[in-house]
Amino acid sequence: MEVVNIPEKGRGMIATEDHKEGKVLLEEEPICSAQFSWGRKLGYSCCFHCMYPLEEPDQCIARLTQGQIISLPENSWTTNEYEKPSPVACPKTGVLYCSETCLKKADYDYMRLLLPNWEAVEEVEDLWRDMNFPRKSQAS
Ligand SMILES: [Zn+2]
Protein backbone atom coordinates (compact mmCIF):
# COMPACT_ATOMS: atom_id res chain seq x y z
CA MET A 1 0.00 0.00 0.00
CA GLU A 2 1.19 3.49 -0.75
CA VAL A 3 -0.17 6.98 0.05
CA VAL A 4 -0.28 9.11 -3.11
CA ASN A 5 -1.89 12.29 -4.45
CA ILE A 6 -4.75 11.33 -6.77
CA PRO A 7 -5.70 14.06 -9.30
CA GLU A 8 -9.07 15.70 -8.48
CA LYS A 9 -9.50 13.50 -5.40
CA GLY A 10 -6.66 14.38 -3.05
CA ARG A 11 -4.47 12.10 -0.98
CA GLY A 12 -5.39 8.46 -1.01
CA MET A 13 -4.04 4.99 -0.47
CA ILE A 14 -3.51 2.67 -3.41
CA ALA A 15 -2.58 -0.97 -3.63
CA THR A 16 0.90 -1.55 -5.04
CA GLU A 17 0.35 -5.28 -5.45
CA ASP A 18 -2.58 -7.65 -5.95
CA HIS A 19 -4.40 -8.78 -2.83
CA LYS A 20 -6.63 -11.78 -2.32
CA GLU A 21 -10.33 -10.87 -2.13
CA GLY A 22 -11.45 -10.46 1.46
CA LYS A 23 -7.97 -9.63 2.82
CA VAL A 24 -8.09 -6.84 5.41
CA LEU A 25 -5.74 -4.08 4.24
CA LEU A 26 -6.30 -1.49 6.94
CA GLU A 27 -8.02 -1.33 10.31
CA GLU A 28 -8.22 1.73 12.46
CA GLU A 29 -10.30 3.18 15.28
CA PRO A 30 -12.82 5.84 14.23
CA ILE A 31 -12.09 9.37 15.36
CA CYS A 32 -15.72 9.82 16.31
CA SER A 33 -18.85 7.68 16.18
CA ALA A 34 -22.31 7.67 17.68
CA GLN A 35 -25.32 5.45 17.52
CA PHE A 36 -28.41 6.96 15.93
CA SER A 37 -30.14 8.43 18.98
CA TRP A 38 -33.59 7.14 18.06
CA GLY A 39 -32.22 3.63 17.59
CA ARG A 40 -31.04 3.54 21.18
CA LYS A 41 -34.27 5.10 22.44
CA LEU A 42 -36.40 2.60 20.49
CA GLY A 43 -34.59 -0.45 21.80
CA TYR A 44 -31.70 -1.24 19.50
CA SER A 45 -28.88 -2.19 21.80
CA CYS A 46 -25.24 -1.92 20.78
CA CYS A 47 -21.93 -1.18 22.47
CA PHE A 48 -21.75 2.54 23.30
CA HIS A 49 -18.11 2.59 22.16
CA CYS A 50 -17.63 0.21 19.18
CA MET A 51 -21.33 -0.24 18.30
CA TYR A 52 -21.09 -4.05 18.24
CA PRO A 53 -24.66 -5.37 18.42
CA LEU A 54 -25.66 -6.44 21.92
CA GLU A 55 -28.75 -8.24 20.72
CA GLU A 56 -28.55 -11.60 19.02
CA PRO A 57 -29.52 -11.91 15.33
CA ASP A 58 -32.85 -13.56 16.18
CA GLN A 59 -33.67 -10.76 18.67
CA CYS A 60 -32.77 -8.20 15.99
CA ILE A 61 -35.03 -9.71 13.33
CA ALA A 62 -37.90 -10.10 15.81
CA ARG A 63 -37.54 -6.43 16.86
CA LEU A 64 -37.28 -5.12 13.30
CA THR A 65 -40.27 -7.15 12.07
CA GLN A 66 -42.25 -6.48 15.27
CA GLY A 67 -42.39 -10.20 15.99
CA GLN A 68 -43.54 -11.31 12.53
CA ILE A 69 -40.26 -13.18 12.05
CA ILE A 70 -38.70 -14.62 15.20
CA SER A 71 -35.69 -16.49 13.85
CA LEU A 72 -33.30 -16.37 10.93
CA PRO A 73 -32.45 -19.33 8.74
CA GLU A 74 -29.06 -20.77 9.66
CA ASN A 75 -26.22 -19.07 7.79
CA SER A 76 -22.69 -17.88 8.47
CA TRP A 77 -23.95 -14.77 10.25
CA THR A 78 -26.00 -16.81 12.71
CA THR A 79 -23.34 -19.46 13.32
CA ASN A 80 -19.62 -19.11 12.58
CA GLU A 81 -18.99 -15.38 12.29
CA TYR A 82 -21.23 -14.13 15.07
CA GLU A 83 -19.68 -13.65 18.51
CA LYS A 84 -22.30 -13.60 21.21
CA PRO A 85 -21.76 -10.47 23.31
CA SER A 86 -21.52 -10.39 27.10
CA PRO A 87 -22.64 -6.81 27.79
CA VAL A 88 -21.04 -4.82 30.59
CA ALA A 89 -22.94 -1.88 32.11
CA CYS A 90 -21.14 1.27 33.19
CA PRO A 91 -21.83 1.54 36.93
CA LYS A 92 -22.06 5.34 36.66
CA THR A 93 -24.40 5.76 33.67
CA GLY A 94 -25.90 2.34 32.96
CA VAL A 95 -24.61 2.65 29.39
CA LEU A 96 -23.87 -0.78 27.90
CA TYR A 97 -20.59 -1.92 26.36
CA CYS A 98 -19.70 -5.17 24.61
CA SER A 99 -16.74 -5.78 26.93
CA GLU A 100 -14.67 -4.44 29.81
CA THR A 101 -12.12 -3.38 27.18
CA CYS A 102 -14.62 -1.06 25.47
CA LEU A 103 -15.88 0.28 28.81
CA LYS A 104 -12.31 1.15 29.88
CA LYS A 105 -11.40 2.62 26.48
CA ALA A 106 -14.54 4.79 26.42
CA ASP A 107 -13.89 5.90 29.99
CA TYR A 108 -10.33 6.88 29.14
CA ASP A 109 -11.06 8.43 25.71
CA TYR A 110 -14.15 10.55 26.47
CA MET A 111 -16.48 9.41 29.26
CA ARG A 112 -14.29 10.90 31.98
CA LEU A 113 -14.96 14.26 30.30
CA LEU A 114 -18.69 13.66 29.70
CA LEU A 115 -19.55 12.06 33.06
CA PRO A 116 -19.43 15.26 35.17
CA ASN A 117 -22.10 16.64 32.80
CA TRP A 118 -23.93 13.41 31.93
CA GLU A 119 -27.38 14.90 32.64
CA ALA A 120 -26.61 17.73 30.20
CA VAL A 121 -25.52 15.19 27.57
CA GLU A 122 -28.86 13.39 27.97
CA GLU A 123 -30.75 16.70 27.80
CA VAL A 124 -29.03 17.60 24.52
CA GLU A 125 -29.90 14.17 23.14
CA ASP A 126 -33.56 14.63 24.20
CA LEU A 127 -33.63 18.07 22.53
CA TRP A 128 -32.13 16.63 19.36
CA ARG A 129 -34.82 13.93 19.26
CA ASP A 130 -37.52 16.58 19.79
CA MET A 131 -36.30 18.27 16.60
CA ASN A 132 -35.46 15.17 14.53
CA PHE A 133 -38.07 12.49 14.12
CA PRO A 134 -36.97 9.30 12.38
CA ARG A 135 -38.59 7.87 9.32
CA LYS A 136 -39.90 4.41 10.10
CA SER A 137 -37.02 2.78 8.20
CA GLN A 138 -34.44 4.71 10.29
CA ALA A 139 -35.71 3.65 13.70
CA SER A 140 -33.03 1.02 14.22
ZN1 LIG B 1 -17.51 -2.56 22.13
Image (cartoon, grey):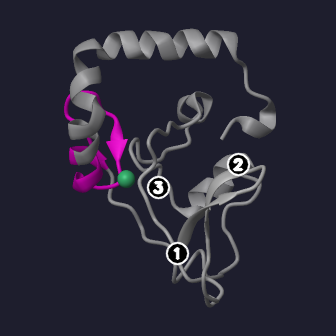
Q: Magenta part of the protein: which range?
A: 88-104
Q: Taking 65 as reference, is 116 above or below it?
A: above
Quadrant (top left/top right/bottom left/bottom right) for the C terminus:
top right
**Looking at the image, is mark 1 or mark 3 earlier in the sequence?**
1
Question: Disc 1 versus disc 2: distance between alpha carbons?
Answer: 33 Å
Q: Which residue occupies the foreground of this view, 7 or 118?
A: 7
Q: Residue at x 34, y 12 (%)?
A: 119
Q: Position of residue 134 (x, y in %)?
A: 73, 26
Q: Which mark is residue 64?
A: 2
Q: Secondary structure at mark 1?
A: loop
Question: Disc 3 versus disc 2: distance between alpha carbons?
Answer: 17 Å
Q: Residue at x 28, y 28 (%)?
A: 93
Q: Which residue occupies the foreground of this view, 52 or 23?
A: 23
Name the mark nearer the viewer: 3 or 2: 3
From the viewer's perspective, is 22 left or right of 67?
A: left
Q: Position of residue 86 (x, y in %)?
A: 32, 59
The quarter holding residue 61 reads: bottom right
The quarter holding residue 113 reads: top left
